[in-house]
Image (spheres, rainbow, N blue to C red):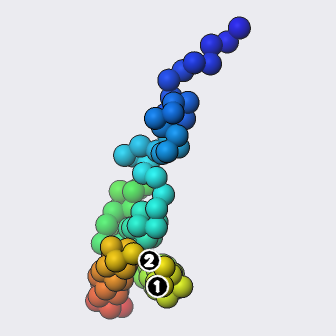
Amino acid sequence: MTDHSENTTENTSEGQGNMGYSPIMPMPTFSTFILSLASSALVQLGEAPDPSSGKMEEDIALAKHTIDILSMLQEKTQSCLDEDEKRLMNGLLYELRMKYVVKR
């Protein structure tokens, strides 16, 4: 008979709220989603190293696409975001757009 009483986050009542997420892989929220997109845009702009290779590379067309996705999300979600999410979205888009203009 196999013992299935391992103490994992998924198996504890304490961990049911976070579904096994950790600081390494945070629970998905709107904020973490847009931060992830913004991080990708920074890599594409050559402002941050690619996490898989460690190299600084630019893909300006892909960066523009990612910024456009964030802009579309801003437009589609503007009436349902809380003030912190709006501030985060506005700040990220401003910074990314300024970096994009410099790179073009």
The residue at the point 48 percent across, 79 percent down is 80
Label 1, residues with CA under 10 Å away: few <14, some 14-19, many ≥20? few
- Disc 1 element: loop
Say whether marks 2 and 1 touch (CB < 8 Å).
yes
Nearest to the observer: residue 104 or residue 29: 29
The residue positioned 41% from the left and 67% from the top of the image is 31
Closer to us: 38 or 43: 38
Question: In the rendered image, is residue 18 in sight?
Answer: yes
Q: Residues within 10 Å of mark 2 (few under 14, many from 20)?
A: few
The residue wearing badge 2 is 81
Residue 61 seen by the camera: no
CA gap, disc 2 to disc 1?
Answer: 6 Å
Q: Which quadrant: the N terminus?
A: top right
- SS class, disc 2: loop
Amino acid, disc 1: Gln
Q: Position of residue 100 (x, y in %)?
A: 35, 86
Question: Where in the figure is residue 47, as x and y percent of width and height?
Answer: 30, 72
Q: Total marks drawn?
A: 2
Q: 65 left or right of 35?
A: right
The dot on residue 78 is 1
